[in-house]
Image (spheres, rainbow, N blue to C red):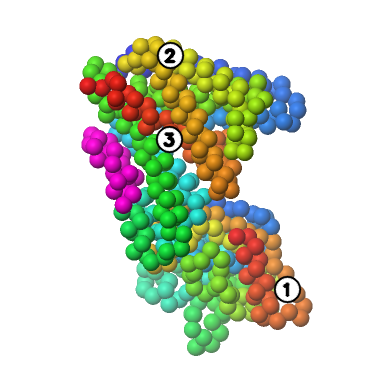
Amino acid sequence: MDGRFLLLFAGVGAILILASLIGWVLSHRVRSDKGRDTVRNLNDRIKAWWVMVAIFAVAFTFGQTVTLVLFGLTSLYCLREFISLTPTRPADHTALVFAFYVFLPLQYYLIGIDWLALFSIAIPVYAFLLLPVLAVARGDTGEFLMRSSKIQWALMLTVYCISHAPALLLLNIPGYENFFLLFFLVTIVQLSDVLQYVFGKLFGKHPVAPRISPAKTCEGLIGGGLSATAAGAALWWITPFTPLQAAGMAGAIVLAGFLGGLVLSAVKRSLGAKDWGTMIEGHGGALDRMDSVSFAAPLFFHLTNYFFTV
Amino acid sequence: MIRQLILAATRFVVGGHPNWIGTTPSARQRIYFANHGSHLDTVLLWSALPDDLRRATHPVAAADYWGRNAVMRYFSTRVLNAVLMSRDARGGDPLAPLRAVLDRGESLIIFPEGTRGNEELPGPFKGGLHHLARDYPDVELIPVYLDNLSRAWPKGSWVPVPISCSARFGSPVEAVAGEDKRGFLDRARQAVVALA
């Protein structure tokens, strides 16, 4: 194991201990009801963060297979949340069986056996063609186009896009340990989310998209986005990038992540829900945490693949 | 142990989060009546109840399906604590096994549609619920809506998909003096529909 792993996890651990201490102090000092809610929300987030970091430590320690299984389970939970909120019909059942039990495991299996070409087209081509065929065989034409799109969107967002994060392990960058790319991606996305939240709470006045996601403000986006980009530049030494390239990559991740959060909020609202699920305390559902990853991962994967692999 | 495994597997695949809207868990004698969309309905509703209530609550299952061979019979009556009921009226009072449970002071889970449907809303209710309500006026009648189950495991398919489902418990349906059978059954059905 690389000494940099220990350094990174020690750093993350130190930040979380500090965050937990701040949360603990705040919870004893806050007086107003509204403040209490905010602090409780913050502390729940910190708690969930500990769990996420523990999971990542396990993944990094035990290598690619365990990482794939963990991301596969994440996709499973996200897909389940998406489909649970999306009104499908009993006639979609066969298509859903294939989405859950064939295309989801297949996507991660293809990463495991390093079959990048099929990994890139399995869901956009084969699932796209097969799932509506399975649905049409049941003979229910009511809202057919809408139902097919819902299942395809669910698969694209929760399986195809998210699987691009562990697929970073496949990129061929000579003399480089790819786990750091995954660490870089997930760290920047989550930092950007939490910093936007904090900056928004502290300075937020002007909502970016009041009808879609009233909690996202220009101040939060700029403050959180710039500091996450700076953090990305500061992490250049674990990436194959120069500091400037690392800042550019982090900026792209921040922007894609922000847009992903916005798009998925719109999807959620069109389904009449506030959170995707109740799995993680303080975080809504798993998809509420992964929405930015699902947009940032494919972009980061392809930028890195295009500019930095042989 | 089989029971714990089945409860755990059910919770993992379809969730089954209880949502007590119109009432709270109580040891009072009750008849829970719900919409029926899949084979998992019984297990899901039963697992949504707290442990201590589950022990004294018996799902009602169709004898022609759940009692058709020794394995099914063992599973339904021993593991799920179900009482089997004959769906055809020949051979005396089909409600006799249900009355036996109520006479012992224990609770029942029934699906008054009598069969599984593939719609979001339940079909018309059969008369058994009315007879039981009339003969056991002290038993609370709790409407329950099982959400998403007909999508997770629709009639005629061989495997469930992991869609989260929930059980919503409504406020008790009271008997109204002078109401006829059809009126009562419609009102009971509406109580389930209102939770959808």
Predominant secondary structure, magenta span: helix
The residue shown at (59%, 67%) is: B33
Magenta stretch bounds: A101-129
A109 is within the stretch colored magenta = yes
Q: Nearer the viewer, residue A252 or B137?
A: A252
Residue sitting at x 68%, y 72%: B187
Left or right: where A71 falls relative to A192: left
Q: Position of residue B95 (x, y in %)?
A: 56, 79
Residue tagged by mark 3?
A: A294
> Secondary structure under badge 2?
helix
**SS at circle 3:** helix
Residue A138 included in the magenta stretch of the image: no
Identify the image quadrant of residue A299: top left
Direction from residue A268 to residue A175 in the image, left or right: left
Quadrant holding the C terminus of chain A: top left
- The nearer-to-camera label among 2 and 1 is 2
Q: Is residue A150 above or below residue B181?
A: above
Compare residues A299 and A36 and report the one nearer the observer. A299
Is label 2 in contact with label 1 (beta carbons under 8 Å)? no
Secondary-structure class at tag 1: loop
**Above or below, A130 relative to B99:** above
Residue A137 as seen in the image, left or right of residue A17: left
Q: Which chain letter goes with mark 1?
A: B
Q: Amino acid at mark 1?
A: Ala
Q: Which residue is mark 1?
A: B175
Number of residue marks: 3
Which residue shows up at 38% across the image and 37% down it?
A161
State which chain disc 2 sits on.
A
Residue B32 % position (x, y):
61, 65
- Residue position for label 2: A233
Decide which of A276, A282 is in the foreground and name it.
Answer: A276
Q: Which label sits in the foreground, 1 or 3? A: 3
